[in-house]
Image (tube, grey):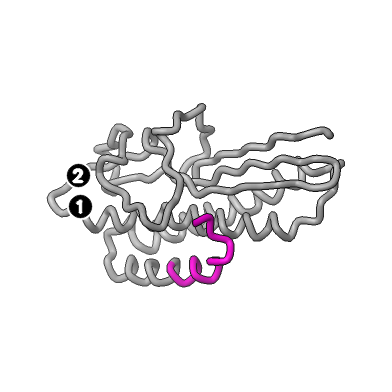
Amino acid sequence: MQVYLVQAIRNSLTLFSFKIVSAQDTLYWSSGYQLTPKDFHGKPDTTASYPSISACGIKYIGHAGKNAVQTEAFGIFIRPKSWAVLYEDDSLWLIHERLNFDIAELFARKLRKTFSEYKFRYATVQQDLDSLYDINHEEMNEMHASYEKETNHGLDESAQSIWNHKIKLEMENFGKYSSN
């Protein structure tokens, strides 16, 4: 049995490749985990007009044999690429950045759904999975861009509240595809 190993990790905020990242540098999305200021290990950009950046994305792994494929997808947060300029009241920016992480998990769920519907073709499995990932990743980037623009990077509390509700509903709609 021939086995393919497919792994992709992309950052949702910028188009750079991740170098191999150690386990303690990567957080995998969990419903019970709340980001803290200690999760932001990157050097802050003090010239930015916003207080923080979360490097969130999706990682997927696929294993294929002659007759089937098994896939996993994860919403991830990369600590060394995430930064924050801390202020006295850090709760608002943490809520904003947690929603970036939640959006990554939402699209990991969407990717799990897409993978579950995939019609296996041995000859093209790797290209198929990569293509499905790329489409999903592009949609996630579009949502992140809209989120940042509409909330003014979390500074517009009213828009932030709307997005919090929107993503909560979307996560519930894809609850069947949750990893936990």
**Magenta range:** 168-180
Q: To which residue does mark 2 refer?
A: 86
Magenta stretch containing residue 173, yes or no?
yes
**Quick one: quadrant of the N terminus?**
top right
In this rendering, would 61 be left or right of 175?
Answer: right
Image location of residue 14, percent across then percent down: 48, 41
Figure check: 120 above or below 3: below
Residue 8: numbered disc: none
Label 2 residue SS:
loop
Amino acid at dot 1: Asp
In this rendering, would 37 be left or right of 67?
Answer: left
Figure check: 34 above or below 163: above
Using a 10 Å C-alpha cutoff, classify the residue at mark 1 as few (fewer than 14 neighbours), some (14 to 19) or many (20 or more). Answer: some
Image location of residue 142, percent across then percent down: 53, 56
Q: To which residue does mark 1 refer?
A: 90
Structural distance between the alpha carbons of marks 2 and 1: 7 Å
Q: How many marks?
A: 2
In this rendering, would 154 be left or right of 76?
Answer: left
